[in-house]
Amino acid sequence: MTGTRFACVVYFIVFCLNAQEKYPKDVFRSPLDIPLILSGTFGELRSNHFHSGIDIKTQQRQGLPVYAIADGTVTRIKVSLYGYGKALYVAHPNGFTSVYAHLQKFGPTIEDHIKEVQYGKRKYEVETFPEYGQLEVKKGDIIAYTGNTGGSFGPHLHFEIRNSVTEKPTNPLLYGFEVRDATNPELIGLFGYPLSKDSHINQSADRVQLNFTRQSDGSFLADEFTAIGTIGIGFNGFDRQDMAANKNGIYSVRQSVNGKVHTEYDFETFSFGETRYINTLIDFCHYSKYQQRIQKVFKEPYNKLNIYNHLHLNGKLVIQEGMNYNVELLLSDFEGNQTKVMIPILGKKGSFKPSKTVDSTASLLIANKPNSYDLESAKVYFPESTFYRDFHINLKKGRDTIAIHDKTVPAHRNFTLTFDVSKIDPEEKKQLFIAHLNDDLKPRYSKTYKRGNTFTTRTRSLGKYTLAKDTVPPKVNPRNFKPNQWLNNYRYLSLTISDDLSGIRSYDAYLNGEWILMEYEPKRKTITYNFDDKTVEQTQCDLKVVVTDNVGNTTTFEETFFRK
């Protein structure tokens, strides 16, 4: 797109945004022709990010038609093994962009376009940005079919509406889509946090789990507890829509203290640039140990989220001796169903058990400065602002394995880990890679850059790392055919590919010497060729598949079949 044309498009979008209401109702049609039942809500807490759309159930099926919600033009098509899988982006004249993800395939015109790109690049994973107006769609056109591609764990449609200029996602339910929901949010856990040097809760300077009971009206009442100093409240809960058992995210949270609002936030919209700050909203240490996300109703100094509509004292409570405090949490879903949680607090001093002391062998890491550490066999470099706050970091040296603190501390940015491999035999180096060890000490490939006598990886995961060796090439097996079989009535050709350690890096397939597109589905370990892609002119078909793992071990599979 030329600069002048691009400027005109941007001006047109901005003009439309200024002229429209913030969230127009009755403008967009549903992306599906079935009742909207959600398995995931907007802003839902996910690993290291907020959910940027809604997940719509597709009756446990794939292949349902996906419709353009309004007139528009396709601006982006992406095919990825992970993340959104097959995804489609449509810009609409009113200044919004709709996003459809985890698709099985695209509509015919769009499918032809993306396959032309894939065959041109000889790659399955591609991303393309069609010229504005090149692939226009009308409201109600079938633009794709629902699937289970990418980082999806069951058939569904991930659906978003974004601002076309800022690219900020907004809650799709704001645009009038109907979802049946008369179910109140649910409270699972309630917690108190001492936040100042001399504060304590029930004579403890550490996080305290608070007991509560459900009342006859459906609200919750916590047992009264004693506290002094600055404290904060946290909770663990979920919401459910009607006709679904999924535990979804809560839309809005409000905390009042003696009738005065201290905290109020909701998930109307957020910025992708701040989504990783979810790790400051939740108690990350607790999550890393128990896989439960406690939302802090107070805001930490390093929390840069803009989801808050109101904050008083950053949501913290200053508890004074002899004073009574009545804290009310109001948990609401998008439809206004509410759950009330009452928390009585008595200000009372007393002796308390100090918080756990810091390991004296740990080094103090200053978060707003770059930090480098020499671990003999490896070096680790943390750029400025890798972490949210200062902390004492534990580092353990080793000849083969090193430990970089533990998984209880979140990293906001990638850091660099470099191993010295100068003393390793050159032939052996070829089959080595940097591995992150899980809790069971099983190695997992971390993308390894090999430069001379150093192996480097960039990661956000703290924990144990080592150099692992992969000597076994990938496995390739036919899935739906046998040697020398006639495949006249077959629509697809399918094989399984797998690797025991470092994982699949690349694969290529050839039919009678010509490259063919095979779609890779890592969850099922399958690669699949659609015979409709190209006309096979020869009766005898010679298939060749070359699969390489992440250290270069290669397997070549060759077989013959027949087709008229």
Image (cartoon, helix red, strand yellow):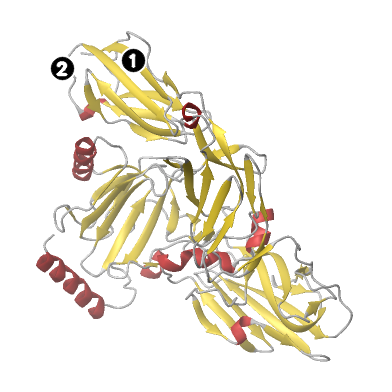
In this view of the protein, which residue sits in the foreground, 350 or 455? 455
Ranked by sequence position, the earlier of labels 2 and 1 is 2
Residue for point 37% across, 50% down: 101
* Amino acid type indicated by mark 1: Glu
* Amino acid type indicated by mark 2: Glu
Q: Give the answer, above or below, for where 300 lies relative to 103.
A: below
Q: Which element type, helix, strand or loop, lies under badge 1? A: strand
Residue 38's mark?
none
Q: Quadrant of the C terminus?
A: top left
Crowding at mark 2 (Cα within 10 Å: few <14, some 14-19, many 20+): few
Give x and y (percent) for residue 96. Answer: 28, 67
Identify the residue position indicated by label 1 in the image: 558
Q: Which element type, helix, strand or loop, lies under badge 2? A: loop
Instruction: Name the quadrant containing residue 35.
Output: bottom left
Residue for point 22% across, 75% down: 14
Give x and y (percent) for residue 339. Answer: 63, 72
Q: Give the answer, above or below, for where 405 lies relative to 504.
A: below
Q: Is residue 150 visible?
A: yes
Give x and y (percent) for residue 266. Answer: 51, 74
Left or right of 396 on screen, residue 265: left
Q: Nearer the viewer, mark 2 or mark 1?
A: 1
Residue 537's mark?
2
Residue for point 37% across, 19% down: 556
In this view of the protein, which residue sits in the foreground, 508 or 189? 508
Q: Quadrant of the N terminus?
A: bottom left
Q: Is residue 171 visible?
A: no
Residue for point 42% across, 71% down: 269
Left or right of 213 on screen, residue 490: left
Q: Hey, which residue is sitting farthest front in the picture?
A: 423
